[in-house]
Amino acid sequence: MLNFSYGSNMLTARIRERVSSAEFKGVARLRGHALRWHKRSIDGSGKCNIVRAEEDSWVYGVVYEISDEQMPALDAFEAGYKPRDIEVEYLGTLERATARAYFARKTDPSLLPYFWYNALVVAGAKAAKLPDVYVAQLKSVKTQTDEDLERHDKNMAIVNAV
């Protein structure tokens, strides 16, 4: 099954921690949507979500093929999201494909992402060679400090290994 990753799962090391079968298929974009950092997380921060937007808006991400056997494991990691099939367009070829994406169940626009979460998203975007202007938008997001230093250090180790 194809999965469209637009948040921290864009980083191959991150998604493979969750599902070892994740195989990079390409970079794609989703038309008529925008990225928000308002998904309510159990850790008290904001995580990425995609929402409907103007038709000329795009969310960029990475398409991975995930084995059918491991999709339930990814669904479990993404329990705060609802999976839905969407149509994405691969960059370069403009070929279209149906992929699964996750949409937040609960949102709160007052939430901010932790610094380490934003760093994971930016690292994934850079590794995938997303457009520079999009990477700059991701980097410009206001973040908060995670008081859980062990969680911060664990996630920054993933970022620093790239």
Image: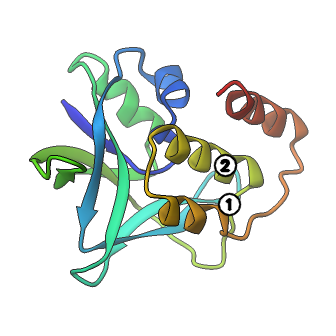
Q: Marks 2 and 1, how far apart in space?
A: 6 Å
Can you identify the residue that label 2 sits on? Answer: 117
In-front residue for pair 96/66? 96
The answer to whether residue 118 shows anywhere in this view is yes
Amino acid type indicated by mark 1:
Pro
Can you identify the residue that label 1 sits on? Answer: 113
* Image mark for residue 34: none
The image quadrant of residue 52 is bottom left
Q: Is 7 located above or below residue 13 in the figure?
A: below
Amino acid type indicated by mark 2:
Tyr
Q: Are marks 2 and 1 in contact (CB under 8 Å)?
A: yes
Classify mark 2: helix, strand or loop: helix
Quarter of the figure with the N terminus: top left
Q: Is 100 located above or below residue 13 in the figure?
A: below
Left or right relative to 30: residue 115: right
Classify mark 1: helix, strand or loop: loop
